[in-house]
Image: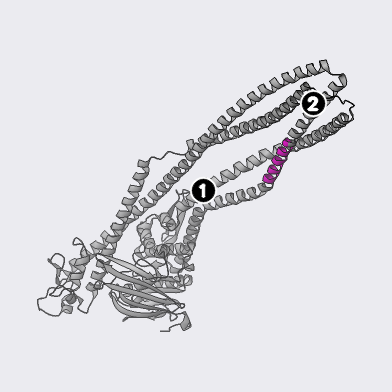
Amino acid sequence: MSEGMRSPEERAALSVRNVGGIDAAEVTFGPGVNVLVGRNATNRTSLLQAVIGALGGSSVSLKGDADEGVSTLTLAGETYTRRLRREGQTVVTSGDPLLDDPEVADLFAFLIESNEARRTVARTGDLRELIMSPVDTDEIEAEIRQSKRRQSDLEAEIRSIDDEAEQLPELVQRRSSLEDDIERKENELEELRAEIADSDARSTESDADEELDEKLDARQQLESTREAVTFDLQTERQSLESLQADRDELDAELEDIQEVSDQRLQTVRSRLNGARERQNVLESTINQMQNIIQFNEEQLEDEEGLFGKLQTEDGSGLFGSLRSEASTDLLGALRTEHDGKGSVTDRLVDDQQILTCWTCGSRVKKARIRQMVGELRDVRADQFDLLNEVEAEIRELKGTKAELEEATKRREELERKRTRLDQEIDTRHERIQELETRKDALDEEIDDLSAEIERLRTEIDATEEDDYSTLLQLQEDAKRLEVEVERHRDELDDVTAQIETVEERIDRRDELETEREELRERLTDLRQRVGEIERRAVNEFNERMAEILDMLEYSNIERIWIERVGTADEDERSISTDASFDIHVVRTTDSGSSYRDTIAHLSESEREVTGLVFALAGYLVHDVHESMPFIVLDSLEAIDSERIARLVDYLSEYADYLVVALLPEDAQALGDECHYRSPPW
């Protein structure tokens, strides 16, 4: 058949060694649909595993009798590699695959039989949880909390600026009044100095005069000092009121934050560690079971006598290898009994053939082995269900842990801040007490000096002429005015500085408003992000499902659709986590009437199609195509050939490369534009 019309540069080359059931293989894929055509046990699934491994997916296994394996994919001039190495009971992966994190691709691009999206639909699991699993809701919640704290700080600062802006006219008026007072007092002072200069008093000052001048100077200095102390005292009292208000707000916030005990946080951490350990055990068990099931299925279908290779006399065959890595309570590979009666191929033809179980040595029919493999697959499905439950528990515990740690961190931060405030308040109290004591002492000194000045004046008045007394009064008035002018200048400087500070903060208000508005939009976006993804997933599924049902022409299915319910709180202060996806089925009777049905009553073919469409919805919602050019598809036997052909054609529109494994009779329904590959690979 045609290899397609694309240029060779667009092809992808795959090289495989010891992956799944493949010893070695090299395959080239062309853009568009690539069909792996073959019967069961021809390593089609193993080849898909090799592709998935090189792309970075987790559904890849090492060949049972090999210690090392590798899968290499060359695409668009780049080479991507996945290496597998056996270490004891586990297989370790390394290399440089296309994806660093395979979670989204595993869910929505690698659609093999064990794909979680397909299985979740088949067992009517939690579709909403599945579609949202790649979204880190804990991180979104943490960002919401951080943004809300910043928003609260911004609003408090804006309120403070508004309060100061209301006081600005009063400050401006005070500045103008001080400037007028200073100008007036300076004029008065100039007049006094002129009067003093023009005075005809030339009398020599007595000892009392000198003493009076000294005491007037001393009182002037004391009054200046008292003015400074009074100003400092007023400033300290205002600071104390502000600190006490801050502490009251902090105490209120502390009351709203839950107090988390170390024991509670340790309990949550311990439960989380325990859940992760259970997750690791379940994943290890599922991987071992997957390897064992796949190996036995391939050997049961193999017609080249591989059962004869399973056990050698020296114990070096596959049995010896598998015994070292599989638990004895799991049904592993099988070995034949070497009795020399006929060829191995002859003994594999009939399901009634008697084989020997290599794990326990009992003789069983081949049909019984098939039955046990089927039972193992059921057990594996149960293990997957347990794994889903454990993963859900891990997500819940991670959220609880993050919330408790955030509360603990915030409470410790607030308590440290409160301790600093308490220390600062105590310091302010001590400073106020010191200033009050000092002011009282200054008042007392000034009163004493004033009394002494009055005494000296009385003494001078009794001995000096009136004109000299007048000169003394003029000098005293001049000194008083000088003190008042200096005090007014200091106050003017303070008021001017306050005005400049307020004006600078007012200029910054627009910037704070812009940041606050951006935060509001960011919070709205964060709160609605989860809901938007959910809505997109529902819309994508419903639209694609309607198109595919119309295309596949299921006779009595009118509609399969998802309803998003439980979203009333999605616009509140935190993101909605209560939403769920309810899947509905509407059928029609022969008479044309409609009735509701459930997903459980769909045929296997209908369920498989529904699961694939749901995976496609996730592929589109999470933009998987931006990082993953492949969709890998397997296990379509439940769907008839014509519908497979239509479905493959539909899916091919969404990926550069669609690789699908099909039986020969199903592959015949596809067109010549596909790229076909057949064994040997």
Whether residue 113 is situated above or below residue 271 in the rendered picture: below
In this view of the protein, which residue sits in the foreground, 270 or 338? 270
Q: Quadrant of the N terminus?
A: bottom left
Check disc 1 and report the residue beneath it.
146
* Residue type at tag 2: Glu
The reply, left or right, for residue 479 in relation to residue 642 is right
Q: Give the percent coordinates (x, y) of residue 172.
A: 75, 38
Check disc 2 and report the residue beneath it.
476
Q: Where are the magenta residues, as a range?
A: 490-506
Q: Give the percent coordinates (x, y) of residue 494.
A: 70, 38
Residue at image point 35% right, 62% down = 603
Asked if the stretch drawn in magenta spans residue 616, the answer is no
Residue 26 showing in the rendered view: yes
Q: Give the percent coordinates (x, y) of residue 567.
A: 48, 48
The reply, left or right, for residue 546 in relation to residue 110 is right
Residue 570 showing in the rendered view: no
